[in-house]
Every structure is written in C-alpha cells, then in structure tokens.
C-alpha cells in the first residue's frame, strides 16, 4: 500500500519543450547531509538506483497540478516533474514541501519585524514578499489558497501593520501592494483579523486605521497611493462580499466595529476642514464665497474628495450605521460647507453626497435636511454660478429635477415655501416652476380631502399628528442606539450654543402667551355645512441651519420675516387646537391645515428671513 502511494514517474523538460520520462520509482523526503537540508529522493523500482535527488528550496516555486502532479524548476531551463500514481502520495509530499516553506517564511517574518534589521535588508525582504505574492497569481486556485492561508497563519497581517507605518516610502509602497493581494484573496480574512485585534489593541494601532492614516498622509501630489488604499477600504466595507452564516452575520459585526473604531479616523480631515471655529476665524479675516473655507491647496481638496467618495459609498450600501453617524455628527451640514470650494470637483463631490442621500427617499433624511435648512448652501452655489452652463449647474438642476419627478412632497414643500422667490427667475428649465405646480396641486388635494371629512373625530382617526411622527422618529433612533452602543445627539441640539438658549426661551414664552390668547379667541365656530371650523396659527419650525455660515446670497432673495410671534425661528411647537362640544374632546394637529383659513382671509403668507 505504501509503495503504491509513493510510486511516481520522474520527468524532465527537454530543449524542445517536451517532457522526457526518466523512469519510475518511489519518492521519499529525507535530510541529506551533503545538500544541508531536506530533500526529495526517488529510487528506481527496478534496481534501486537514484533517479532524483533534489533539495527542497524555499526560494523555489513549486506547483501542484491536477492533484497528482508536482512541478518545479531546479535551474534556468531545467524543469522537473513528479507524476504520482495516487493523490494521497502527492498530498503527502506536497505537505513536506510546504513545511519547509513555512520554516523559511517564519525566519523571514522574524527579520522583517525585528527593529534591529537594517533598512536595506528590510526593503529587500518586503520586496521579496511582494514578488512572492505576485507569483502566487500564476498558481492553481487551490495552491494559491494554500499559499495565502500559510502567510496568514505565519502572521503576515501583523507584520504589515508594522511595516506600513514605517518612514521608508519604498517599504510602505511594497507593503501596500502585499496588502492589496491579501484583500483581493479574502476580504473576510482581513476583517476577521482586525476585529480580533480590536479586542486587545488601541484604535490608533489597528490595521485598518493604519491604512486610513497612510491614505490621509500620502505625500504623492497625485495621491496615487491614497487612491489605491481607498479602493481597498471600499472592498473591506462592501456588504456584497460579506458572509452570513446561521450563527453570525459578518456584515453587522464588522460594520459595528468599523463605525465604532474607524469612522472617526476616516472623517477627521473632513470635520477639521469644515469646523465652525475655522469658519468663524475665516469670516473674521474677511473671507467671502470666493475664498474657500477648506484649504485651497489641490492635494487637500483631492483627499477630501476621496473621503467623500467613500462616504457616498457608505450611504448607498450601509443602512442605519451611516444614517446614525450622519445625524449624530450633523455630517451633511459639514459636507455642504465644501460647496464653497474653488475646486469644482470637490463641490461636485459634496453635492453627490447629498444627492445619494436624497435618492434614498427616506423621510428621516428628508426631515433632517428640511429642519437643518440644508438646501440653502446648494441654492447659494446655484445662484453664485450665475448664467454659466457647466457641470455644477447641471448637477444642481438634476438634484431638484429628481425631487420633482419622484414627487418627494416634504422636500417640495420646503423648497417652494422657503426658496421659490430666489428661484422663480430661473426659466431656462421648467424644474422650479414644476415644483411650484406640484406643491400647489398637493395643497389643493389636501384642502379637498379636509373639506370632504364631515367630522373632527373621523379626521382624528385617520391622520397622525406631527408630534406622533416625531415620537416615532425618536423611537427609531433609540433602537439604533442599542445597535450602535452609542447615544444619539440630534444635530439640532448639538449645534446650538449655550448663548442661544436665553433668547430662545424668552421668545418661547412670548409665543406661548400669544398662543393662549389666540386659543381663547379662536373657539370652534359652526360652519354653514354643520361641521366645525377652526382657525390655526402657523408656526414654521426653524432649525439649527438658520445661523449657518452658508447663509449668503439667498438671504437677499427672500421676503422679510413675518411679524407674527408664531413665526419665530425658535418655535418648533406643533399647532393644536382643543375643541370641546358637550362631552366630546378632539385633538387636532394637522401641519397643513393652516392654508384653509389663510386662503379664506386672503392674507399673503410670508416666509421667515433665511439666516435671521
């Protein structure tokens, strides 16, 4: 049985590139003193003569083919092959060869990560691994898998973590190439390593954070290395190549890890270059729209564009993780600061980020955008662009056209009510007039619907008030907090300064007193139809966007704010009227009902001044 398993034919490749049969014998693996190492020996089955004596050399590229064939080159133009009678014998000898390789690779890894190794030697070792990985691409799939699994077992990833942080540019470049081979081979293997690593290491030394920092600190003017690293990061955070088993879901585990341990490193340059302190400082220095808030240098703009590209990918492919992060950090507001950049490609990246968010048609995002007045920097950019017909102009128009075609009612209403005066002069496209038409049609439909309802109680059964919607939204975020393990601070609360509160509170009390007096005057009146008629006070909700640094050209385009106290920018109270008739009490909270009485009284509706 043993003889059959080890029975082989020995072949050599001749000058005509044909295989010559050198005889049949039995192969063994043993230490040969003369060769100073483990060697492959083949003795002829006929007379026991030595057909082959070959030292197993770690520098030699052995290939296993078709389960029963091992091929290698001893020297230039001298190729050898062993053809096994049985697969089991081939596997046994192949294992011997790999053990020798492992021993050699272990020694190389030790030298690579040893601080005593001189720079020239380390550069030579890293380049060796790079060439080794490049050669592996020529192997059969099962051999390539075995090769990379061996590298992983020997500690290639911890070694890369060390060498990627070194000062030597050539070493870092070669290490990045090796890392790309590993990510391409198995992103799951890399993800598993970094998640295990997070349990015993600080965030700043995690392999993925080392990769992000190398991307951020790339000294190449064209950011060639940063582009390569960004592609690798996108592969690692792509849910499409994440595994799901019955016991665990790689997607949820890894994304929780990434957003808790790595996202702050990725967004640091973006948040730094769009900080409010920086905006205030630039404004004091007399900056205007032509002087960008972010640094003017091209390399920084390129880096921010790369980061935005990755964040846009997250919006498309991640769910509550990125939504929670955007709202927690008020990230879209910070991104839209870059609409002021003198680099058009960066402004377009910022706009594309917002376009992806709106493209999801998610009402939580829509409420965040309208409450934050986040269309203002986009409309400012459109107006600043003037009559120039360029890519920025087309991209902004496409954004609003999407809202019109998809009939996103909440955004349409916000745009028309707050910006139509500034946009109605744009007639080379019908987008904004189309939005106005959609808005008016929806108002008519809502009015007809209200007129067709005979009683308040019936209306109350089928309509949900704004307060309930806000409570649902808060519940949704609370559920996400459990997933993320972090408390969510809404951007509205975060962006307010303590100095705002005394003024806000005083206006709130004035509004409250005015509302109480209105409630007494606006008691239910019997209408001619026999139902009840109500007068609603309108209190548009202003947001943390009203004091944005981007409040510029649109401000002069809008009408003055209403003198009515109920239009205060700090008022975010749901309008409710309590009607009492006999023992029946109805609570009515319809955000759109104020138009009914306004139209009957023919009083023109005034919008609050933007940025006031």
Image (cartoon, helix red, strand yellow):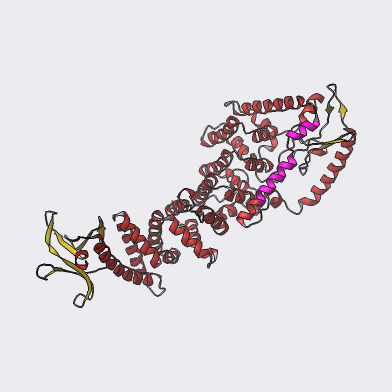
| Residue 477: x %, y % from top left | 66, 49
The answer to if 460 sits in the magenta stretch is: yes
Q: Residue at x 51, y 34 (%)?
A: 390
Q: Is residue 372 above or below residue 129?
A: above
**The quarter of the displayed image where residue 364 is located:** top right
528 w.r.t. 472: above or below: above
The answer to whether residue 378 is above or below residue 130 is above
Query: Which quadrant of the figure has residue 554?
Result: top right
Viewer-side residue, 288 vs 339: 339
Describe residue 407's horizontal placement relative to residue 176 as left or right: right
Q: Quadrant of the N terminus?
A: bottom left
Q: Position of residue 434 (x, y in %)?
A: 62, 26
Instruction: Give the percent coordinates (x, y) of residue 235.
Output: 45, 51
Which of the pair 606/402 is nearer the observer? 402
Question: Is 134 situated left or right of 567 in this image?
Answer: left
Residue located at (87% from left, 31% from top)? 524
**Looking at this rendering, what residue extends furthest in the front direction?**
1
Magenta: main secondary structure: helix
Whether residue 59 appears in this view of the structure is no
Span colored in magenta: 456-478
Quadrant placement of the C terminus = top right
Question: Residue 509's x, y, as percent?
Answer: 85, 46
Query: 358 or 417, which lies in front?
Result: 358
**Looking at this view, is 385 or 336 the one in front?**
336
Which residue appears farthest toward the top when viewing the image? 528
């Amino acid at each position: 049985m043993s003889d059959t398993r080890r029975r082989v034919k020995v072949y050599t490749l001749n000058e005509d590139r044909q295989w010559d049969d050198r005889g049949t014998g039995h192969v063994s693996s043993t230490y040969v003193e003369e060769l100073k190492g483990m060697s492959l020996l083949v003795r002829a089955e006929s007379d026991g003569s030595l057909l082959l004596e070959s030292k197993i050399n770690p520098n030699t590229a052995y290939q296993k083919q078709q389960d029963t064939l091992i091929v290698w080159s001893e020297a230039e133009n001298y190729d050898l092959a062993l053809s096994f009678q049985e697969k089991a014998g081939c596997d046994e000898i192949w294992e011997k060869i790999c053990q020798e390789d492992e021993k050699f690779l272990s020694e190389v890894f030790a030298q690579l990560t040893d601080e005593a190794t001189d720079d020239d030697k380390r550069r030579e070792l890293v380049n060796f691994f790079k060439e080794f990985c490049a050669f592996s691409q020529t192997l059969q799939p099962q051999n390539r898998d075995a090769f990379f699994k061996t590298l992983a077992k020997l500690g290639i990833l911890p070694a890369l973590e060390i060498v990627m942080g070194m000062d030597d540019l050539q070493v870092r470049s070669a290490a990045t190439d090796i890392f790309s081979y590993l990510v391409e081979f198995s992103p799951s293997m890399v993800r598993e390593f970094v998640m295990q690593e997070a349990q015993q290491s600080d965030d700043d030394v995690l392999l993925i954070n080392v990769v992000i920092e190398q991307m951020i600190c790339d000294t190449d003017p064209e950011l060639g290395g940063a582009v390569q690293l960004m592609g690798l990061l996108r592969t690692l955070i792509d849910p499409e190549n994440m595994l799901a088993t019955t016991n665990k879901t790689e997607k949820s585990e890894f994304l929780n890890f990434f957003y808790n341990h790595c996202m702050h490193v990725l967004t640091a340059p973006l948040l730094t270059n769009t900080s409010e302190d920086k905006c205030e400082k630039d404004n004091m220095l007399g900056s205007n729209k032509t002087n960008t808030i972010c640094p003017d240098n091209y390399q920084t703009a390129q880096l921010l564009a790369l980061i935005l590209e990755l964040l846009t990918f997250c919006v498309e492919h991640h769910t509550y993780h990125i939504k929670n992060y955007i709202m927690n950090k008020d990230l879209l507001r910070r991104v839209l600061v870059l609409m002021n950049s003198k680099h058009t490609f960066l402004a377009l990246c910022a706009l594309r980020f917002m376009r992806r968010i709106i493209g999801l048609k998610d009402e939580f995002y829509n409420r965040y955008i309208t409450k934050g007045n986040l269309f203002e920097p986009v409309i400012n950019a459109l107006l600043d662009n003037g009559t120039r017909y360029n890519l920025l102009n087309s991209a902004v128009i496409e954004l609003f056209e999407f809202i019109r075609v998809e009939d996103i009612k909440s955004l349409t209403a916000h745009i028309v009510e707050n910006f139509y005066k500034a946009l109605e002069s744009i007639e080379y496209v019908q987008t904004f007039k189309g939005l106005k038409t959609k808005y008016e049609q929806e108002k008519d439909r809502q009015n007809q619907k209200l007129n067709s309802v005979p009683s308040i109680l019936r209306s109350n059964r089928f309509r949900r008030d704004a307060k309930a919607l806000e409570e649902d939204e808060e519940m949704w975020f609370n559920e996400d907090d459990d997933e993320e393990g972090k408390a969510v601070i809404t951007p509205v609360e975060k962006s307010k300064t303590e100095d705002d509160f005394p003024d806000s509170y005083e206006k709130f009390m004035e509004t409250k007193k005015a509302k109480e007096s209105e409630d007494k005057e606006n008691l239910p009146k019997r209408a001619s139809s026999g139902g009840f008629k109500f007068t609603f006070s309108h209190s548009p909700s202003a947001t943390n966007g009203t004091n944005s640094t981007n409040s510029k050209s649109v401000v002069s385009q809008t009408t003055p704010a209403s003198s009515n106290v109920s239009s205060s920018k700090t008022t975010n109270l749901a309008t409710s009227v309590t009607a009492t008739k006999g023992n029946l009490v109805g609570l009515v909270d319809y955000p759109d009902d104020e138009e009914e009485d306004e139209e009957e009284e023919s009083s023109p509706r005034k919008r609050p001044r933007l940025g006031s």
